[in-house]
Image: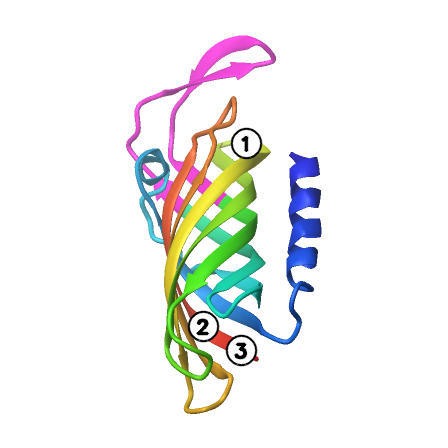
Amino acid sequence: MKKIALSAIVLIGFALNVNAQTSYWTFSWPISMGIGTTNEYISKTSFRGISITGESFITDQISIGGEWSWEVFDEIKRDLPPREVSFDGVPGHVTGTEYRFLNTIPIFVNAHYYLGENGAVRPYIGMGIGTVYVDQRTDIGFVSIQDQTWRFGVQPEVGVFIPFGLTGTGVSLKAKYRYATKSSDAIAINMFSFGIGFGFMN
């Protein structure tokens, strides 16, 4: 997966130099929530994170670029049944209040299709593909169960850029669904993320 991450970074760098005359950067605050098994693990909405994207337009409507973001989830779970664990290969059970943590760091290559023209409101749809670093940890008393892995991920997205007047600066609004594959010891990642921030198009 490290090779995937490196390849994604190289592709992002290439994409951002395809057409330096028309570029679009966004800096967003993501509000994220898990669905499916991710919601079962942590149902609490995450308000902690950051998202940075950079794109170059290869035509008036199509852009290629990349994204890096970071989302942090945490939740306290009480009154749970005993959890089966293994201590140096010896099976056992632990019970108690669980402190659950989930960090996701995706590195994606993106392609977006935009409506409208430069200087106007520009809605878009797009798709990202790449790798997601997932750090999943559960603390129960003195026992810590942790999985840190790089995984394959995909991310469809819709959004809109709303400029301030005739400037290249404006508001960026976006909604994304992210899926990252399951590891041998941890759940697959399924989540929605809604981002609000600033965009810079020139």
User: Looking at numbered disc 3 in the image, what kind of residue is underneath it?
Assistant: Phe
x then y, percent, for residue 59: 53, 66
Identify the residue at horizontal 46%, vertical 80% (top origin): 118
Q: Is residue 168 left or right of residue 42?
A: right
User: Looking at numbered disc 1 in the image, what kind of residue is underneath it?
Assistant: Gln
Foreground residue, 193 or 130? 130
| Residue 133 in which image quadrant | top right
Residue bounds of the magenta highlight? 75-102
Q: How many marks?
A: 3
Task: Report, in whole angstroms, how far the alpha carbon at label 3 lies from the one at label 1.
Answer: 39 Å
The numbered disc on residue 146 is 1
Q: Is residue 75 visible?
A: yes
Mark 1 Cα within 10 Å, few/some/many (few <14, many 20+)? some
Of tags 3 and 1, the one toward the viewer is 3
The numbered disc on residue 200 is 3
| Residue 124 in which image quadrant | bottom left
Q: Provide the secondary structure element on which disc 2 rests.
A: strand
Identify the residue at horizontal 69%, vertical 64% (top origin): 17
